Image (cartoon, rainbow, N blue to C red):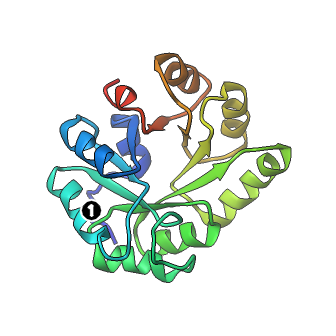
Amino acid sequence: MAPLDTPSLPALLEEHPVAASVKNEADLQAVLRADCKIVFLLYGTVLDLPAVVRRLKDAGRIVLVNVDLLEGFAGKEIVVRYVKERTDADGILSSKAFMVRAARELGLFAVHRFFLIDSMSYRNLAPQVRQSKADCVEILPGCMPRVISWVVADIDVPLIAGGLVCDRDDVFAALKAGASAIASSNHDVWAM
């Protein structure tokens, strides 16, 4: 478990409301030069994950690993344990409630990701969040202010707007609609 003086993920996002979504080595190099404190790592393999996380941690970043996108892993809870025991990551991202819940039980930060593609996926969100006990929810795409306001009204955890948040207007619209933070792979957004 994290030490008692470790800030919560919502507190960290309040202080650093833009998370850098890193999808490849070029993004990794860019984020190491950027001023972004929180990194959502969206790539890696069973072989290179510990070293990639170590590079980010050595640069003073808070690192959350998307366990759904790791190569060489099955979509089972053991991947969360691997992240906890074999890397220095601070937490995970996953679209699977059982993975998010497993991370919380292991003392990792946990972000429950939702791809909102229709009304059915929207209606499923709040029950899934109650089940996962996530620290935060990330909705994708995050460029839908109306939907962000609906989700914020339905859940009791902070919301991160991610995916297709491309510019300053998208960032401010998402924040105005109630998002607590933004996650973006756009290097220009990282500098906001």
Q: How many marks?
A: 1
Q: Quadrant of residue 13?
A: top left
Which residue lies under the disc numbered 1?
Answer: 53
Q: Residue at x 23, y 54 (%)?
A: 56
In the image, is residue 138 above or below residue 167? below
At label 1, which amino acid type do we have? Val
Q: What percent of the width, then of the height, locates residue 100? A: 55, 66
Q: What percent of the width, then of the height, locates residue 55? A: 19, 58
Q: What element carries label 1?
A: helix
Q: Which residue is drawn at 71% across and 60% down?
A: 128
Left or right placement of residue 11 versus residue 158 in this view: left
Q: What percent of the width, then of the height, locates residue 175? A: 53, 26
Residue at far top of view: 169
Q: In terms of depth relative to the viewer, which is nearer, 79 or 147?
A: 79
Q: The N terminus is located in which quarter?
A: bottom left
In the image, is residue 166 above or below residue 152? above
Q: The C terminus is located in which quarter?
A: top left
Q: In terms of depth relative to the viewer, which is nearer, 162 or 26?
A: 26
Q: Residue at x 48, y 75 (%)?
A: 105
Q: In which quarter of the image is residue 53?
A: bottom left
Residue at far bottom of view: 78
Q: What percent of the width, then of the height, locates residue 151? A: 70, 39
Q: In terms of depth relative to the viewer, which is nearer, 40 or 101?
A: 40
Left or right placement of residue 144 versus residue 78 in this view: right
Left or right placement of residue 55 versus residue 106 in this view: left
Q: Which residue is drawn at 26% across and 57% down?
A: 5
In the image, is residue 40 above or below residue 187? below
Residue at far left of view: 58
Q: How crowded is mark 1: few (under 14 residues within 10 Å), some or many (20 or more)?
A: many
Q: Quadrant of residue 65?
A: bottom left
